[in-house]
Image (cartoon, rainbow, N blue to C red):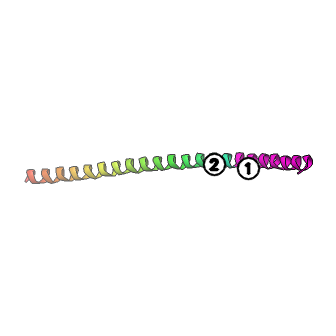
């Protein structure tokens, strides 16, 4: 193998390394974007769960108040007789 051929091979290896390095940087950037989106989805899910729990708490409280009011009305009616 001549020096010229060796130099050509080294040049091709360097070009390939540069190309792969650029592609890896692009993949890393895309991965970071995906991770950011995933974080946003997880935060959105946590907010949705918190909202759902809060809504359920309000529904339970409302039902308890309705039951307590109904019992109070019945007791007043029974005790008034």
Return the residue nearer the eye: 58 or 5. 5
Horizontally, residue 13 falls left or right of residue 51, namely right
**Chief secondary structure of the magenta portion:** helix
* Of callouts 1 and 2, the N-terminal one: 1
Q: Residues within 10 Å of mark 2 (few under 14, many from 20)?
A: few
Return the residue nearer the eye: 66 or 74. 66
Of all residues, the one furthest to the front in this rendering is: 1
Percent x, y of residue 73:
18, 52
Residue 47, numbered circle:
none
Q: Which residue is mark 2?
A: 31
Horizontally, residue 53 falls left or right of residue 23, namely left
Q: Is residue 17 magenta?
A: yes
Q: CA distance from mark 1 to mark 2?
A: 12 Å
Q: Quadrant of the C terminus?
A: bottom left
Q: Residue at x 66, y 49 (%)?
A: 30
Percent x, y of residue 10:
84, 46
Q: Say if 32 sits above or below 81 in the image.
A: above
Q: For the residue labelled by badge 2, is the local secondary structure a helix, a strand or a loop?
A: helix
Q: Which residues are magenta?
A: 1-26
Q: Is residue 28 magenta?
A: no
Return the residue nearer the eye: 57 or 27. 27
Q: Residue at x 51, y 48 (%)?
A: 42
Return the residue nearer the eye: 75 or 68. 68
Residue 23, numbered circle:
1
Nearer to us: label 1 or label 2: 1
Percent x, y of residue 26:
71, 48
Q: Residues within 10 Å of mark 1 (few under 14, many from 20)?
A: few
Q: Residue at x 21, y 49 (%)?
A: 68
Q: For the residue labelled by badge 1, is the local secondary structure a helix, a strand or a loop?
A: helix
Percent x, y of residue 67:
22, 53
Horizontally, residue 21 falls left or right of residue 49, namely right
């Amino acid at each position: 193998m001549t020096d010229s051929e060796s130099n050509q091979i080294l040049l091709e290896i360097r070009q390939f390394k540069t190309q792969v390095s650029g592609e890896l940087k692009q993949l890393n950037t895309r991965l970071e974007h995906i991770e950011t989106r995933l974080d946003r989805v997880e935060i959105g899910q946590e907010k949705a769960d918190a909202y759902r729990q809060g809504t359920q708490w309000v529904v339970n409280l409302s039902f308890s108040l309705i039951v307590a009011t109904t019992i109070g009305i019945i007791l007043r009616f029974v005790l008034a007789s």
